[in-house]
Amino acid sequence: MDRSKLYRRFRTLLIANRGEIACRVIRTAHAMGLRTVAVYSEADRDAMHVALADEAVLLGPARARDSYLNVERLIEAARKTGAEAVHPGYGFLSENAEFAQACFDAGLIFVGPTAAMMNAMGSKSGSKALMEKAGVPLVPGYHGEAQDDATLAKAAEKVGFPILVKASAGGGGRGMRIVRSADELGPAIVSAKREAKAAFGDDRMLIEKYVDNPRHIEVQIVGDSHGNLLSLFERECTLQRRHQKVIEEAPSPTLNPAQREAVCAAARKAAGAVNYVGAGTIEFVSDGKDVFFIEMNTRLQVEHPVTELITGIDLVEWQLRVAFGEALPLKQDEIRLNGHAVEARVYAENPTKNFMPSVGRISTWRLPAETGGLRIDAGYREGDTVSPHYDAMLAKMIAWAPTRDVAIERLNRGLEESDVRGIVTNIPFLSALMTHPKVRTNAIDTGFIERELAVLTQAAPAPGELELCAAVAAIINEEQRAAGAQANSPWQTFGWQPVGRRQRGFAFRVGHGPEQKIMLNYGSGPSMLVIGERELAFAVAAKEGGFDLTLDGVKSSVAAVVDGHELYLRTRNGRFDLHWVDPFGGESEEQAGADKIAAPLPGTVVAVLAEEGATLEKGAPILTLEVMKMEQTLRAPYAGVLKSIRCKVGDIVQEGVELAVVEAAGE
Ligand code: ADP
Ligand code: ADP
Ligand code: MG
């Protein structure tokens, strides 16, 4: 094919995506002098990517199928705005060959490979067949066309359990199930197919030997339309949860230089097999000895910043220059590896509640400045709403340093200095990961997070003296601020009382824990805080985001957010969420009990797994919801009889709605 027709200079770029990657692409496009067009759904009218772009076009309703996945509307948006090229980001239509073809047919440049290359490499099955021919080592398995139960069962038997059932069109760890014995195979295929159909519109499956506790190694490659193909070193993404990357780093701390050269050469061979054009990633799993090809991603990857930080190359700039039809600006031996970079994915999710996505308004969004090797790629700002319709990734935090140890230290400090409120995030969990000794020494595999979950999601320590004093200081600060007192002397107004001392009592608790009491004595003379028998002299100096608290002669910095009766503090001992118990009572305690079988978030019922009248063991599955693209099974909270099911497959249910009732056994 004559590639000169596919790639040429353009001035206006439409970004067919949302969130951080849309913002990321817009930033580089602007730096290159391009005009940018954002697209958005009804849920994203006020989203950050819409604000950043020069123009924006509404695609349709919130549901991805009606907006970000609607090819016709996207092409129409390009036509309306005079966009000449389309950057697909990652996720959504980024690996959809029909979309790439539709762009081409409409006279648009697709920033990425051709539809033909995507067809060859985009499906896991197709790419494995190709790699087999090119002599790239594969995980043993079945990647044929036939999809009937008997064929898949026979293939699984032949490969030998444990195996992995994988959606050929899969991504983001979706549509994938580990199967350890023959009797688990049938249900695993049904559920993987359903998830794959919903997420990718394609439910073809392949079967692979499950490599126990492997590492994930991948190589960044870039090709141009002149036949040049480069590898930009590897990344290691072994810290995963449910086959989804959580932390990524470059270079891999596991490979020695000879292994590095070998895996990069294998990746160039793989991409060379289709004369690849654009940015792409060749993924491998490693059993510690050898590496095996698992898939190619024909797009920019979430974790591309770690490669950018160790090579000094802007991958989006290179993507756009390749789309202009330019030749790659460097030769293989001009690409140098400098230092080490680590990335953490910041999600709106609750690690202590099985990583349930968290939706709502971001009331506080404080991230550290991008200095000292820290980079932040965000898709949200303070006041933005996280909707249940899309992936829950909010931002990525990336740190660079000359060595791995320092890069990890910098990343951890960046995480510790981040305060995001209004929704629950995985930031403390990421911090726990970054400080885990086995992460520091690289003694990890893809099962590490699952095994260490209890340690990684440990409840915060109980608040001590410092935190109780800080809580009082935060409240007084907030009251002074609200009263319009001078910001630099919030405590002076306490000295005016001419005679005697006055007291004010406070009580705090964490979750449903016990109340902790503290008394503030003020009036003439220095103010004191009293906790039980202890009396503490203290001083407070307000500053941006919090205050310096001097307690018994030691000054320490405290970050504080006061949101009504909820206090959020960060002290040298960690993060603390305190509830200020209202001295005038009226605490309305009761929330939905854990026994209620209710939708945790708005979602769609995708399967009903038990019948009314059935006797259920504790933990027996009742129904499956799809919430934010992930399947979530609701289970019996105790043994009993399923009295009623109040929904059916296909129902869209609101948060908190009771979906089934189980009557406890023996009642
Ligand atoms: P996705 O398209 O969802 O990224 P991948 O095929 O890349 O799917 O697999 C995702 C993750 O699942 C990998 O990073 C790896 O941790 C794990 N995985 C994939 N294939 C295997 C395998 N054969 N054995 C063990 N783990 C695997
Ligand atoms: P990567 O290595 O880039 O993570 P994956 O194959 O794991 O590649 O997944 C692609 C990425 O696309 C995922 O990380 C996921 O967060 C993102 N993604 C998938 N679906 C959506 C969506 N609906 N909205 C935004 N991002 C999405
Ligand atoms: Mg993958």
Image (cartoon, rainbow, N blue to C red):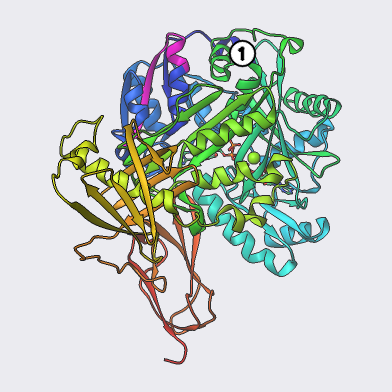
The magenta-colored residue range is 28-41
Figure check: 225 above or below 305: above
Q: Residue at x 28, y 52 (%)?
A: 520
Q: Point out the residue furthest to the left here.
A: 498
Is 258 positioned to the left or the right of 121 in the image?
Answer: right
Q: Quadrant of the N terminus?
A: top right
Q: Would you identify the image quadrant in which residue 478 lies?
A: top left
Q: Nearer the viewer, residue 160 or 119?
A: 160
- Residue 168 seen in the current view: no
Q: Disc 1 designates what residue?
A: 3
What residue is at 63 percent from the left and 59 percent from the top?
A: 189
Task: For residue 619, say whether it is visible.
Answer: yes
| Of 570 and 169, the residue lying toward us | 570
| Residue 567 picture location, percent across and down | 33, 49
On screen, residue 616 versus residue 564, left or right, reads: right
- Callout 1 secondary element: helix
